[in-house]
Image (tube, helix red, strand yellow):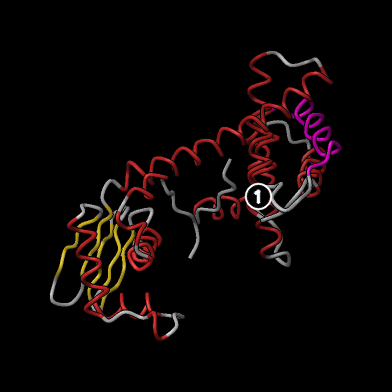
Amino acid sequence: MQGYIKLYRKLMDSPVWDDPNYLKLWMFCLMKATHKEREVLVGNQIITLEPGQFVTGRKSLTEELNKGMKPKHKQSEISWWRYLNNLEKWQMLNIKKTNKYSIVTISKWVDYQENEQQLNNKRTSNEHQMNINKNVKNVKNDKELFSSSNEQEFAEVFQFYQLNLQKGVSESPYNTELITQWFDEWGQDLLMASMKVAAKAEAKGVKMVEGILKNWKEAGVKTLEDARKYETDFKAKKTNNTIPFKPKRVKEAEDNGYNYGF
């Protein structure tokens, strides 16, 4: 089980705080509740759970809560179920009961749990964008050659590199400098295209991008169309290098849906 839950100090003013069994049950409910919509299989039935819900039953609830407890601290099935129903009376949750299972819904889940998670997700995204902007700014300060439009284009290229090629590779000023040089030489479209070819091959770092650009340069690639034709030809030759390449095979490759993503 992963993730976290959020607790408020006003829990200490609740009757739950004064009884260890109620407190354990409440913590259990918060940690069992799903943070996002998902489907679960109960018997032969698929149930869709909304954020703040979980499925339980008298027997399964008792087994999970008594697990690891000393015999003298274990509670009966009747007791645990009575505690859960009392939480419903205190409007901390509600229980939808069937003859096979029950769906428990935590009250005000969105107010006390989900909004905080959404805030953290947004914070993580903003921090990531700030790091990208910082790298772009550093390059701009070093080179002092970017117009505002070029700066935005370079940011898009560098972000693609970070998200798709840098994972698992330590950040290096040398790599940033290389990408800057390639951007100056090839422009946004062709540099992005070379990175997409490398990402499709699940390559990491800049080595494969460097090799792709070297091959394109030797082949006289100047436009995206040139790059597409080169990669299509390369794919066809690699697939069957014993048959002389003919223009017809390029069309066949395109008709078969081969796509480099640019």
Say which element carries label 1. Answer: helix
Q: Determine whether, in the image, residue 81 is placed left or right of residue 184.
A: left
**Circle 1 is placed at which residue position?**
199
How many marks do you count on the picture?
1
Q: Determine whether, in the image, residue 216 is placed left or right of residue 235.
A: right
Name, please, the residue furthest toward the front.
18
- Label 1 Cα crowd, 10 Å radius (few <14 / some 14-19 / many 20+): many
Name, please, the residue furthest toward the bottom.
71
Residue 252: image location, x then y, percent:
54, 55
Residue 259: image location, x then y, percent:
55, 49
Q: Name the residue: 84% across, 36% down.
A: 173
* Vertical order, 83 against 148 (above or below): below
* Vertical order, 193 against 65 (above or below): above
Residue 28: image location, x then y, percent:
38, 65
Q: Does the magenta stretch include residue 57?
A: no
The image quadrant of residue 106 is bottom left
Q: Determine whether, in the image, residue 174 is placed left or right of residue 83.
A: right
Q: Name the residue: 71% across, 46% down.
A: 166
The image quadrant of residue 242 is bottom right
| Type of the residue with mark 1 | Ala
Q: What stretch is highlighted in magenta?
A: 171-187
* Vertical order, 62 against 113 (above or below): below
Identify which residue, 132 or 93, lies in the foreground: 93
Q: Does the magenta stretch include residue 173?
A: yes
Residue 65: image location, x then y, percent:
37, 75
Q: Name the residue: 64% across, 47% down.
A: 164
Identify which residue, 94 or 132, lies in the foreground: 94
